[in-house]
Amino acid sequence: MIPNDAVLLEHGSGGLLTHELIATVFLRHLRNFCLERLEDGAVLEVQGMRLCLTTDSYVVSPIFFPGGDIGSLAVYGTVNDLAVCGGRPLALSCSVIIEEGFSLKTLDAVCASMAVAASRAQVQIVTGDTKVVPKGKGDGIYITTTGIGLVTYHAPLAISQIQPGDALILSNTIGDHGAAILCSRENIELASPLTSDSAPLSAMIERLLAASPRIHCMRDITRGGLGGILAEIALQRGLTLYIDERAIPVQEQVRGVCETFGFDPLFLANEGNMVLICDAGDADKIVQIMREYPCGRHATVIGTVSGQTDARVIMKTCIGGERIVELPTGELVPRIC
Amino acid sequence: MIPNDAVLLEHGSGGLLTHELIATVFLRHLRNFCLERLEDGAVLEVQGMRLCLTTDSYVVSPIFFPGGDIGSLAVYGTVNDLAVCGGRPLALSCSVIIEEGFSLKTLDAVCASMAVAASRAQVQIVTGDTKVVPKGKGDGIYITTTGIGLVTYHAPLAISQIQPGDALILSNTIGDHGAAILCSRENIELASPLTSDSAPLSAMIERLLAASPRIHCMRDITRGGLGGILAEIALQRGLTLYIDERAIPVQEQVRGVCETFGFDPLFLANEGNMVLICDAGDADKIVQIMREYPCGRHATVIGTVSGQTDARVIMKTCIGGERIVELPTGELVPRIC
């Protein structure tokens, strides 16, 4: 039994309760100019340079899943958070909390995977820490990666920069990571196998920033899915976003998994997919560049930012109706990242 | 039963097994110029600036202890790691892993403590992450803090900079944190209460760096205690350190706790105490400055670096004998930080 005045799994879902927890506990005590912006990372001015700092703990279960593992996920996740803040990754730190009894061979495999991922994302892990907790006080391994990046884009990249008329661009199919984790957890074998989209977005983003001076905001899609990210953006910016369900690419297998388990692909996590919001005039160019990269091969404009100030996400559905997309509630898929 | 090929609690002790794990797993896969230096943080050159990055996970049990709690410990620990690298703290990140069912009131108290600690250490927590794991897969709360700092000291601060003839200075009494945690865990009440020394060293270190151009290396004393840190330094630098047991300040209560539990204060943790190694000519000046600060009130020269290359720590004991101080083995006090 979980008491009333307690943290619930849902507090970690990336949905409504996560936002409430951050606002009522963390922000209330620690509020400052950077933290209250609630972006994926903080941008700091240091002697005329803009540095970006981002951190995430990874508690994914299972540790190994089709298309990735906790080690590569931790590296790519942090690199992606830097990249969407406009930061070219300078270095990562890595801190592990290992449960007593965890296999040294598995630890070795996780480390090897981190090394490959770091090399692929062209970044080094320069410092770290190792803690061991007693058996039953952890779950194999938890990894916290923190990244610093150098921001050179001419303009701020932030939710506050989003303007009415901007285009909403999605880089890839939604829900691949969440559905792959679900299948792996439930031992489901699909006729055509489904893998996580876990991948670094940094090379693609570097190209995009060089190509367009009118990008206003980027977000990688993780916990809470596309729907969660868009609802968050609408709320924070105070504008209404219109999206078209028919434009949103979803793999057939992901649709199938969602039907089986009663999930909505809109709220399933990705780990190598992003939303980019830019001046509509640059949208075509950006989509074309994205499509040159595997992580952007399904890139497309999925909607637009309106001037309405009721801060909602309105989705035109496949059958022609309208649906309001809200911050997700309920447990969704726990421990997805 | 923990299988042979498994991670043991001792791997997290900061002693011999921790060093072996880092060398055979983490360094083997992730080796690079920064990581292999095995300092408390990494110093990076970025556009002519030297930035310092450090990370630590905190899994201390109990969460609240005399003189501190996991929140303030996480802030001071990371600030101290930056400070001993010569870094003036620029910003911290904070990532929490909370066990389902953890009291929201306790979370609030931990957060409030972090806020007070950050304000005392004159640093802001600018970004963070929150994960929740199911009941039985954690232990209340684990906190990972990462810090970036700006290094302006003229010379590198590193074990490699230590020279024969250098003085070894200790800033305070040893073992206070470890003994306070032990008493708290075992519900021992001492006639005169013992509190952890958990505190930020940054203000004192800033003064020291401004006062002496001949500081070669600093280390804050945490897991593994003074003995562990010195053994590590001797091994890495390849020189023999001579210390005098009579010069090392130990509080009476700490001595008592050590006798009760069979611990050696040399290997008990501190969380607001440091070793500084400098040119012997500056030692008196440094000791005098340290004594102006509460965290340096027992500052004293405890030994010297010799030119011998057998890489050991030799302690002249109180009764006039000699003892070799080696990297600690065994579980020491687990989950001390």
Image (spheres, coloured by chain):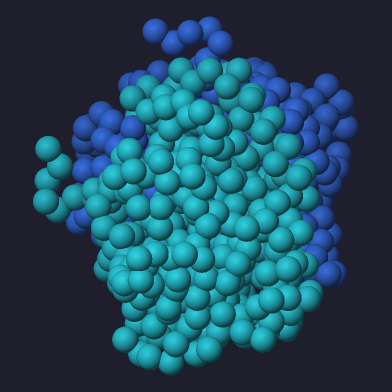
Chain colours: A blue, B cyan
Using residue B189 as the reference point, say whether residue A302 is left or right of it. Answer: right
**Residue visible at 67% across and 33% down?**
B113
Image position, residue B2 (x, y; %): 15, 42
Q: Is residue B40 visible?
A: no
Using residue A225 as the reference point, say whether residue B184 is left or right of it. Answer: left
Q: Nearer the viewer, residue B101 or A175?
A: B101
**Residue visible at 36% across and 90% down?**
B309
**Residue visible at 19% across and 50% down?**
B6
Q: Quadrant of residue A28?
A: top right
Image position, residue B272 (x, y; %): 60, 52
Please say if A61 is above or below A2.
below
**Residue visible at 73% across and 68% down?**
B288
Return the residue found at the far front. B319
> Number of marks in the image?
0
Q: Quadrant of residue B325?
A: bottom left
Q: Nearer the viewer, residue B299 or A330?
A: B299
Q: Quadrant of residue A328?
A: top right
Image position, residue B55 (x, y; %): 54, 56
Q: Quadrant where the N terminus of chain B lies?
A: top left
Using residue A21 as the reference point, say whether residue B96 is left or right of it. Answer: left
Q: Nearer the viewer, residue B79 or B219?
A: B219
Please say if B154 is above or below A91.
below
Using residue A53 as the reference point, say whether residue B160 is left or right of it. Answer: left
Image position, residue A65 (x, y; %): 30, 45
Q: Is residue B317 visible?
A: yes
